[in-house]
Image (cartoon, rainbow, N blue to C red):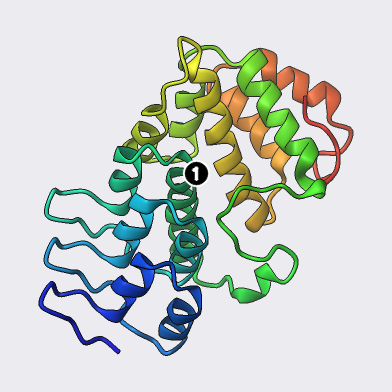
Amino acid sequence: MNFQNLNLEAPLHLAVKNSHIPVIHSLLTAGCNINVADKRSQTAMHLAAESARIEVVEMLLKAGLDLTLRDRQGKTALGVAVRADEVIVVDMIIKAERYYTWRKANPEVNESIHSENPLTFKLDHRYETKQYRSSAWHLAYKILKPGDWKRLAEHWSFTKDQVAAIEEQWTGQQSYQEHGNRMLLIWLHEEELAQKSIAKDLFQALSLTGNKKAADMIRMRTLDSNSKSCSLL
């Protein structure tokens, strides 16, 4: 199961290269070494990040692999995804990094937290989170000024590498708007899994980072800070 060929590729490397989902599933279920590296010091996650195979990326991230491992060029899987300009994969990896950091800091949390919100790192298209996603877009595109999203990211303990990875995307002179939107959606992912009060936490973060205008708008428009369905902005 962990046998490596002359290129030091394990079966998991080959299955990922060929997007062979059933084989990947079988290997992961059997407990293969998910962090094994080939002769380029690349793990299966490096390969998946570079080729942007979303389903494969999702499977590997949920397996809890080591995202700090670097290839011969010194790139983590996040760095590889950034270099390949794979924005969706970049955001998935950052979600996973933050999720596992949170789980490590909260060992008392068990898998039952996923009974209501199944673990996934993909883009969220669910109807029940539409209001929050719309609010995040409005905040990022209509209210936050250049630099505001970075202050929020720092407040929420995004790492420098994570901020740099988000910022690498270029969509024009107003790129900061999309950067802020992506950062907010990543934060929302963690907030929901941790079952926190999204409106309350966002209000506090905006207040503490000097954005009183946006904070006041949330306070006025949120009827219940614990509501799962209200609009924030």
Please name the amino acid that badge 1 sits on: Ile
Q: Residues within 10 Å of mark 1 (few under 14, many from 20)?
A: some
Can the viewer see residue 67? no
Name the residue furthest right: 223
Q: Which residue is mark 1?
A: 88
Residue ID at (35%, 45%)? 81
Instruction: Please indicate whether residue 191 sits to the left or right of residue 164 in the image.
Output: right
Foreground pick, 25 / 208 = 25
In the rendered image, the quadrant that contains the N terminus is bottom left
Q: Position of residue 14 (x, y in %)?
A: 31, 73
User: Residue 19 occupies which quadrant of the picture?
Assistant: bottom left
Residue ID at (33%, 50%)? 50
Residue ID at (39%, 87%)? 31
Instruction: Please indicate whether residue 90 sits to the left or right of residue 142 in the image.
Output: left
Q: Position of residue 100 (x, y in %)?
A: 45, 61
Can the viewer see residue 182? yes
Q: What SS does tag 1 mark?
A: helix
Foreground pick, 18 / 119 = 18
Instruction: Please indicate whether residue 157 sits to the left or right of residue 216 in the image.
Output: left
Residue ID at (34%, 48%)? 78
Q: Is residue 72 above or below residue 88?
A: below
Q: Position of residue 45 (x, y in %)?
A: 34, 62
Q: Is residue 104 above or below residue 33?
A: above
User: Residue 86 occupies which quadrant of the picture?
Assistant: top left
